[in-house]
């Protein structure tokens, strides 16, 4: 299956979210907060985009 640009963005955001949760679980270090913590609305936007990307990828999984 060929991926379009939106699909690539969602998969990258899902990977970023997974890596962030891994860092939180192993080292108690939140990379998103470390990078965007000074700008709370941007940090929240990243979390929202990661969550929406997970939903999109889940839907694509069942669409196949």
Image (spheres, rainbow, N blue to C red):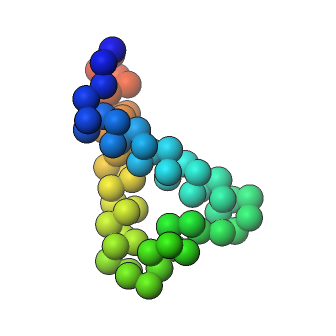
Q: Picture coordinates of residue 50 (x, y %)? A: 39, 53
Question: As rendered, which of 35 and 59 lies closer to the eye?
Answer: 35
Quadrant containing the N terminus in the rendered view:
top left
> Residue at coordinates 65% horizontally, 63% vertically from top-left?
24
> Residue at coordinates 32% horizontally, 77% vertically from top-left?
41
Relative to 1, 12 lies left or right: right
Relative to 11, 29 lies left or right: right
Q: Quadrant of residue 3?
A: top left
Q: Picture coordinates of residue 52 (x, y %)? A: 31, 49
Q: Picture coordinates of residue 53 (x, y %)? A: 34, 45
Q: Picture coordinates of residue 22 (x, y %)? A: 65, 53
Count of numbered circles in the view: 0
Relative to 23, 37 lies left or right: left
Residue farthest toward the bottom in the current orientation of the protein: 38
Image position of 44 with respect to 38: above or below: above
> Residue at coordinates 26% horizontally, 35% vertically from top-left?
5
Q: Quadrant of residue 23?
A: bottom right
């Amino acid at each position: 299956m060929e991926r379009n640009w939106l699909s690539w963005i969602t998969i990258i955001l899902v990977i970023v979210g997974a890596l962030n949760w891994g860092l939180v679980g192993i080292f108690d270090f939140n990379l998103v907060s470390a990078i965007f913590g000074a700008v709370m609305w941007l940090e929240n936007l990243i979390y929202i985009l990661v969550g929406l990307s997970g939903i999109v990828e889940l839907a694509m999984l069942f669409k196949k």
